Image: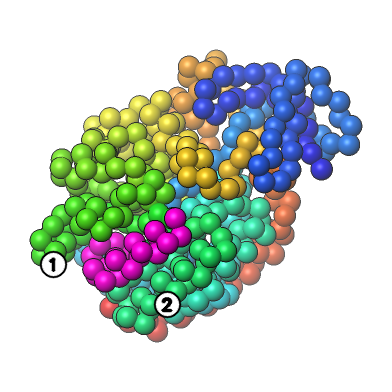
Amino acid sequence: MAILLQNANFVHWDTLVFQPADVLVEEGPGGRITLGSPGGIAAGEHDVIDCRGKLVTRSFAVAHHHVYSALARGMPPPPSPPAGFLDILRSIWWRLDKSLDADSIRMSALVTAMAAAKSGATFVADHHASPHHIRGSLDIIAGSFEQVGIAHLLCYEVSDRDGSHSTALGLEETDSYLQGKQGLVGLHASFTVGNDTLKKAVELMQRHDSGIHMHLAEDTCDQEHCLDNYNSRVVQRLDGAGVLDSSKTIMVHGLHLDDDERKLLGNKPCWVAQNMESNLKNKVGRFNARGLGSRIMLGTDGMHSDMLRSCRAAFLAGQGVDQIDPVSAYARLRNIHRYLKQNGFAGDDDNNLVVLAYDSPTELNSDNLPAHMVFGMHAGNVRDVIAGGRLIVKNRVLQTIDEETVLKESAAQSRRLWNKMQAVGVP
């Protein structure tokens, strides 16, 4: 059934033009929206939602996420305080991902999808790792996302850090998944991916007409390892392998780059995903877009699913480091739509909308909407969410799943996961 949003203040996400309108939303892939004058579209058989005094605009999307970290919130600290970025990976995240199984992966994906929906995001590009449960892991995540109503672009994080068997399984899972669903070829980072694995990943990318989704120079250790082992900086190494030649490729972080790397990356068709809060948490530096061009998107790096929060963090933490203002912050927030459309990925059509209950004490217009999004709006303003023409959040309540039941189960799964982690030694 189509949805009729009556008396809305519709905002075109790309032009920022405000238009008082009734909005008729069609369901299904490629679904369209029809704008009519307020009161100009008859209710008919439609599901009617009163949007008087509310903003209606395109929903949000996450350009880089980590489902596998969803059950980490509040977990016990590692055996000893991490001394740096590599220690953080070894003592926390690589112990957690080794402890994941089918049940905890499913629960991680469900709570991620629910959080995304309630924050107004209807599409997630995820970068997954579960070395002891690789086969079928992407289908588990896809099924969980679809249960909530979230569209997706998934990949498995292939790495050599857990041995050749794990690497082979990761490549097999990627090949199998891409034969039936849209997705990307995932790699962890240059410092855990040898030349043979890199070559095989690029071959997979080319065979499936896909792209690579990979961490890039998140910490100086990535550059140091590349120089020591390949006599090259990371961007040059990846470029030589063909990673950067696809407009579907997503390079994540991109902090520790020299001017030559920035110029090379900026002249390639690939995209960069910025994750400022994660960078701050890990004390690895702050993002700077200098020389990278305009193909910059925003992710959450598994910390949360709130894109308005990521937009604000990118702006605030970028002061004094990055050339960023509210307009460019908003552009980065919305660039994921351009990336998805450019590359023909499904799931982010016009019938993905968010209804915002945002009562501003000041004028709100096309010129200052980016500033309102940076300084005023937050996930609490999300009232209703429409994904693919389906109402998945109504009056801040999920419509596709019993949130209370899932959260009770996720609490139990998190305790089980944390207990399993205690048995995993630090690599």
Range of magenta residues = 188-209
- The image shows residue 319 at horizontal and vertical percentages of 28, 32
Q: Residue at x 34, y 34 (%)?
A: 294
| The C terminus sits in image quarter | bottom left
Residue placed most toward the observer, 83 or 209? 209
Q: Secondary structure at mark 1?
A: helix
Residue 72 sits inside the magenta stretch: no
Q: Nearer the viewer, residue 49 or 242?
A: 242
Mark 2 is surrounded, within 10 Å at the Cα level, by few (under 14), some (14 to 19) or many (20 or more) other residues, namely some
Q: Disc 1 and disc 2: Cα gap in Å?
A: 25 Å
Q: Quadrant of the N terminus?
A: top right
Q: Is residue 320 left or right of residue 52?
A: left
Q: Is residue 376 visible?
A: no
Residue denoted by label 1: 229
Return the mark for residue 169: 2
Q: Position of residue 413 (x, y in %)?
A: 56, 73
Residue at 20% x, 49% y: name it.
256
Dot 2 amino acid type: Leu
Q: Indicate the amino acid at tag 1.
A: Asn
In the rendered image, which quarter is residue 21 located in?
top right
Quadrant of res 104: bottom right
Where in the figure is residue 43, as x and y percent of width and height?
Answer: 86, 29
Colouring method of the image: rainbow
Above or below — where is 13 with respect to 335? above
Residue for point 46% across, 60% down = 208
Residue 233 visible somewhere in the drawing: yes
